[in-house]
Amino acid sequence: MRDIIIAIDGHSGCGKSTTSKLVAEHFNYKYLDSGAMYRAITLYLLRNKISYDNEDAISNNLSNIIITFKYVDGNQNTFLNNENVEKEIRGDKISNNVSKYSSISIIREHLVSIQKEMGKRKKIVIEGRDITTVVFPDAEIKIFMTADIEVRAKRRFEDMKNNNPEVTYSDVLENLSERDSKDSNRKDSPLRVADEAIVIDTSDLEINEQTHKIIDIIKNKF
C-alpha cells in the first residue's frame, strides 16, 4: 500500500480515538489525536487564567505553548511544555471548557498549521472534528464516525466512573449534547460530514468490529 493520510472525524464517544490508534498500529502509521492538542491549549490557558474571550492574551501566549506526544508504558501521552498532562486533559474541567477555547479562530488556525505540517510525510492516522473538512480535505481516506448519543454517553460514563466516582450518566449525556451542539454550530470549522467521507455508525459495533471495518475499507481501496 502506498503512503496515505487516513483522516477520521466524528462525535465524542463513538470510539474514534481507540479505533484510530488500532488502525494506525495495523498499518504501522503514526497516530495523532488532534483533540488532545486543543485540550492541552485549554489547560494552559486555564492555568494562566486567560479567558476564552480574551483573544489578545491568547494570541500573545500561543508561542509559549509546546505540545508533544511521547509513548509511556506503550500508550501515547500528551506533553505540555515537557510536562505529561495526559490524565489532566481528560478530566471534567477540561472537558467542560475545551469547546469554548477550540472555537476560537486563532487557536484553530494555529493548530491546523501544525497538524498540516505533521501530515506532510503522510503515513499518519489523524482524528478529530475538522480533519476531513479543513486540515486534510484531500486525504486519501476520509471517515466520519457517529453513534446514537445515548450509546455514546453510556460508553463515556463507563470510561469515566472509575476515575471520577461522582460523575453521573446524566452529567455525561448533558455534556455530550452540549459538545455536539457547539461543535456542529461553531463559526469556524464546524463538525460536518465531508464530501466523499464514508460514514460509519458505531452504535451497534464493538471496537474490534469498527476497527476491522475501517481496515477493510482501506485495503479495498488500496
Image (spheres, grey):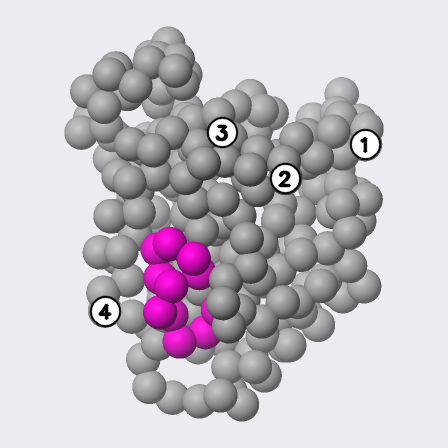
Mark nearer the N terminus (2 vs 1): 1
Residue position marked by numbered label 4 in the rendering: 121
Checking the image for residue 40, the label placed there is none
Image coordinates for residue 121, horizontal then vertical, percent = 23, 69
Tell me the amino acid under the disc marked 4.
Answer: Arg
Residue position marked by numbered label 1 in the rendering: 169
Q: CA distance from mark 2 to mark 4?
A: 32 Å
Residue closest to the far top: 49
Crowding around mark 2 (Cα neighbors within 10 Å: few <14, some 14 to 19, many 20+) is some
Q: Secondary structure at mark 2?
A: helix
Residue at left offset 45%, top offset 36% = 187
Mark nearer the N terminus (1 vs 4): 4
Tell me the amino acid under the disc marked 1.
Answer: Tyr
Q: Tags 2 and 4 in contact by the CB under 8 Å rule?
A: no
Quarter that holds the N terminus: bottom left
Quarter that holds the C terminus: bottom left
Mark nearer the N terminus (4 vs 3): 3
User: Which segment did they paint magenta?
Assistant: 131-142
Q: CA distance from mark 1 to mark 4?
A: 41 Å
Q: Secondary structure at mark 4?
A: loop
Q: CA distance from mark 3 to mark 1?
A: 20 Å
Q: Tags 3 and 1 in contact by the CB under 8 Å rule?
A: no
Residue position marked by numbered label 3 in the rendering: 98
In the visual, does 222 lie left or right of 65? Answer: right
